Image (cartoon, rainbow, N blue to C red):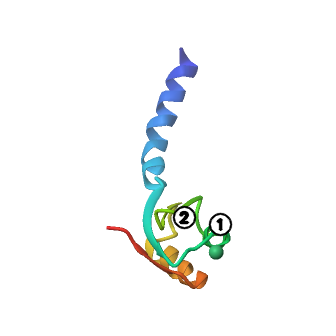
Amino acid sequence: MKRSMKWVAAAVVMAPFAAMAASQTLQMNIDGMTCGNCAAKVKKTLAPICKEVTVNLKAGTGTCIYDAPVTAEQVLAEAQKTGFTITQKK
Ligand SMILES: [Cu+2]
């Protein structure tokens, strides 16, 4: 009983931090990709800054899941290094 009460207290204390660290998702339009290598290049470029990167070659879109202190602006700035036109999908 004592142990479970402690656990609940810890969970309550940790909750605000967990909320702060919630991952953000950036949806992108990616212009100029023509093959799998292009998609791989985008993924590789964004991999160091994003927690998870997915690229849809056919749709010309991508998704980056990132955590603070990384911002959407930083992800987009990094994305410009690929040479493709990558913008935030609205
Ligand atoms: Cu290509």
Which amino acid type is shown beneath numbered disc 1? Answer: Gly
> Which residue is at 50% across, 23% downward?
5
State if disc 1 and disc 2 touch (CB < 8 Å): yes
| Quarter holding residue 35 | bottom right
Which amino acid type is shown beneath numbered disc 2? Answer: Leu
Distance Cα–Cα, label 2 vs label 1: 7 Å
Q: Which residue is mark 2?
A: 57
Quick check: which quadrant has ligand 1? bottom right
> Which residue is at 45% across, 59% downward?
25
Residue 11 percent location from the top left of the image: 49, 35
Furthest residue to the top? 1
- Badge 2 crowding class, 10 Å Cα cut-off, few under 14, some 14 to 19, many 20 or more, is some
- Mark 2 vs mark 1: which is more N-terminal? 1
17 or 50, nearer to the observer: 50
65 or 63, nearer to the observer: 63
- Reply above or below: 77 against 11: below
The residue at label 1 has a CB less than 8 Å from ligand 1: yes
| Quarter holding residue 53 | bottom right
Residue 16 percent location from the top left of the image: 42, 48
61 or 68, nearer to the observer: 61
Q: Which mark is residue 36?
A: 1
74 or 90, nearer to the observer: 90
- Reply above or below: 72 against 56: below
Secondary element type, mark 2: loop
Residue 70 percent location from the top left of the image: 52, 70
Quarter holding the C terminus is: bottom left
Residue 80 percent location from the top left of the image: 53, 83
Left of 27 or right of it: where is 42?
Answer: right
> Which residue is at 54% across, 28% downward?
7
- Badge 1 crowding class, 10 Å Cα cut-off, few under 14, some 14 to 19, many 20 or more, is few
- Reply above or below: 16 against 78: above
